[in-house]
Image (cartoon, grey):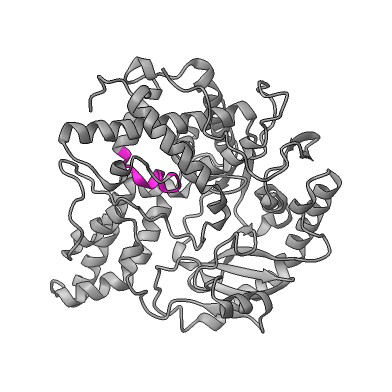
Amino acid sequence: KRSTKTMASYTIGIDLDAGIIRDGVKRPEWSPSDEFNFSVWYDAIREYTFPTVQVPLYLDEARAMLKYYELAKFLLLGYELKRQEQNDEQTPQTRKGIIDPYKFAGGWPETYWFWAEDQLEGRGNPDWKLKPEEIDPIKRVIERIDKAINENFKDQSVFVKLSSRSPKDVSLILDETEDILVKLVKDSIRKHEAIDASPLTKEKMKRHSMEEDGVLFMRAVTQTLQARSGEEAMRLLLRSSRANVDMSTCEMTLHNSQDRGLSNLPFSLDLFIRQWNPEILPEWEFRTVIFNGKMTGITQYSKICFVPGMYEKREAIAERIHHFWLTKIKDKVEGALRSERERLKNAGAAEENVTDTDKDMNYVVDFVLSPDLSKVWVIEVNNSPPLAGTALFKWKNTADRKLLEEGPGLTIRVNERPPAKMHQKIHPPLRNAILKVRGLPYEPVLRKNHERDRATTPIVVDDGAEDSHVDWMKTGLVFVVAFAAGAVLGYFIPKKLTV
């Protein structure tokens, strides 16, 4: 028998009865960061970013997606515990009886997800098959995504995200990510061997590994976020802990709603389908920090990437980004933020959740450049630090924080040399795949009889963020997951479950 409750049942310190008006419909007020949702700023600067289509998401659909993720977690944990019981083994995670919900998507091989999805979608144990009312809302979302792709991006790849964040954590577990990464590493080795006209020595292999593997890793995990159909997009969303946390946060604000059963009640997050641009190289992405309407910091977005020649071009990069921001988008972005703040204020949003329209013009803009600096694209607008991470600046460092908040002037930081211990910051199974191809030492397999080793504390894709915006939720979620783990063993997972 399956649980009928969602995980989002604990309380947080926001006004559950407050609401905002959007498109003539009252929606929940869920976070101070609502003013930075994609729909707020996109229209103002659409000519400088990627073509995007908004797909509405409704309450029953969001709840169906949350329930799917919750049930998949129960199944995955039960599958792993039963597998270990049959093989007489344990991992530190299961000895403690708990898993980390924030790194959940990155913590399980894709083969496990295939198994859990088979159970829920009727290709496995019929006792676990979702009922029509549980799966049909998800199918409706898939149909709308398909329609958006076919009408706007036919025969193209797209990138899907929520109003808040994307499901990019999922790329870590995809088999395709490892396949792409291995190919990129092998291509790099062949290139250098062709230049040297001989096999690489161990020392040269180590040097190329330190210089290139961060970039190759980022390219691989980025490529696997492409979707060409509604089903592919939904797979990413349903497996993502980032998407789950954001939707759970919004769903929590609806507990006092009298219309919980209405299928046409708009949810406070929507989906955005963005055209995939094959020109983009993730190592050329930069985060810019704006305080009091002045750009004070520019940082390489991925801390693990070293790009030869970038450090030497840092002043030209800073000038190109700053000039583009100042002349193309500054007034438009800040105008959109002021309008949204005023709208939130007039709609009766809680005072602590609305920034003053006349001050605190603090925010972050992510840009990506072409390597020759001839092209600039805006990726997105985000909250100011510390809600948004600061990558090569350390927000907790007093001097760095003062630079970002006060200046003087504009500071840019990029990696001058390959980062120390760069490989330790790469998701362990992918790190091992890289080092194995290069013939360099790598960690031993962590589990017996399993073809894909996995660290007990996998590292999420480096997005320059410190994830402080979810720290306040950890105690509640860890408690819920601990309870769920016990429920799995004692009630939810059938004793006859085999793997």
Magenta segment, principal secondary structure? helix
Counting the numbered discs, the total is: 0
Does 452 appear above or below 70? below
Q: In this rendering, does residue 157 appear at all?
A: no
Q: Is residue 142 left or right of residue 252?
A: left
Does 205 appear above or below 105? below
Q: Residue 56 in the image: state x and y as whole percent.
A: 65, 35
Q: Is residue 318 magenta?
A: no
Looking at the rendering, which quadrant does residue 482 occupy? Answer: top left
Q: Residue 137 in the image: state x and y as whole percent.
A: 56, 24
Residue toward you, 338 or 228: 338
Q: Residue 434 in the image: state x and y as whole percent.
A: 25, 60
Which residue is situated farthest in the right direction here? 346
Q: Quadrant of the C terminus?
A: top left
Looking at the rendering, which quadrant does residue 319 occupy? Answer: bottom right
Q: Is residue 102 magenta?
A: yes
Q: Residue 354 in the image: state x and y as whole percent.
A: 77, 53
Q: Is residue 106 left or right of residue 263?
A: left
Looking at the rendering, which quadrant does residue 9 occupy? Answer: top right
Q: Which residues are magenta?
A: 101-110
Q: Is residue 87 left or right of residue 459?
A: left
Residue at (34%, 33%) from the top-left corner?
76
Q: In this rendering, does residue 345 appear at all?
A: yes
Does 302 appear above or below 72? below
Q: Quadrant of the N terminus?
A: top left
Does 307 appear above or below 353? below
Residue at (51%, 46%) from the top-left corner?
475
